[in-house]
Amino acid sequence: MTDKGVIFDLDGTLADTLADLTDAVNVGLRAFGFAERPSCDVRGWIGEGLPTLCSRAVGPAGHVPIDEMAAIVTRYYREHRLDKTAPFPGVPGLLDALTERQVPMAILSNKPHEHTGPMAHALFGQWSFVAVQGYREEGWRKPDPRTALGIVARMQLEPGQVMLVGDSATDVNTALNAGLLPVGATWGYRSREELLASGTRHLVDRPEELLALI
């Protein structure tokens, strides 16, 4: 086993979930009489949990009970979360290479855990992960470092030996808060500029480039 570990974000890093998330958000918007929004809008709202996603979709224009909208979105997404979702190109090969090198891997997402677990199993079940953890309670969602540090402990490594790979400032801030090495995935849903401004140590443009950092 190497002396390095990798924690991956899910949406926008391992898997392209944008189309299914856009469909689910639009079901919620239609339920409250709002117009649908395109995926180019939704991609900028992903990454900080479902309530925040719904709140951003509604915006300041209307007073909508976000918990009710989130419930509607969740019901739809539960049935359709894998209709269009797939691993990003190059991700399976990266996971193969990390497994061959005996690098411990984990998934840490702000997607609700009821979706994160089954989706990770369906998309990436052939690979072994030390932990697969989604959003469970507001106070512990990324960029709070506590869940990430718990995963590091399960890897039996020190924080400085573990990378956190993600596509957003939230992921970078989680890494910095936990003392991990932040790595920005530029194929995801945020810009290079956002990743650099948030303090990432490295940018990778293709999944296989991560291997050079191991």
Image: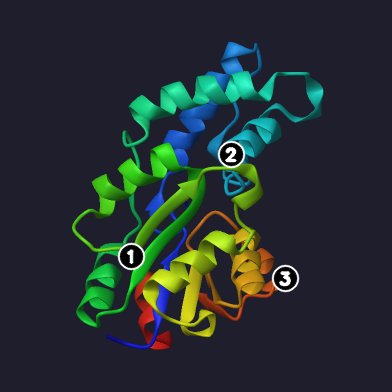
Q: Looking at this rendering, what residue extends furthest in the right direction?
A: 60
> Can the viewer see residue 186 in this picture?
no
Q: Which of 30 and 214 is in front in this view?
A: 214
Q: Write down the residue under mark 2.
A: 42
Q: Where is residue 32 in the image (x, y as percent from the top left)?
A: 64, 13
Contact, CB < 8 Å: mark 3 with mark 2?
no
Q: Write down the residue under mark 3.
A: 197
Q: Write down the residue under mark 1.
A: 130
Q: Residue at x 47, y 78 (%)?
A: 162
Q: Residues within 10 Å of mark 2 (few under 14, many from 20)?
A: many
Residue 120, numbered label:
none
Q: Which residue is drawn at 45% across and 66% down?
A: 151
Q: How many labels does the image show?
A: 3
Q: Which residue is drawn at 62% across and 39% down?
A: 41
Q: Which of 155 and 68 is in front in this view?
A: 155
Task: Identify the image quadrant of the C terminus.
Answer: bottom left
| SS type, badge 3 | helix
Mark 2 is on which residue type?
Answer: Val
Nearest to N terminus: mark 2 or mark 1: 2
Relative placement, left or right, of 155 versus 165 is: left
Tell me the CA gap for discs 3 and 2.
21 Å
Tell me the CA gap for discs 2 and 1.
30 Å
> Can the viewer see residue 135 in this picture?
yes
Q: How crowded is mark 3: few (under 14 residues within 10 Å), some or many (20 or more)?
A: few
Q: Is residue 45 above or below residue 72?
A: below
Mark 1 is on which residue type?
Answer: Val
Nearest to N terminus: mark 3 or mark 1: 1
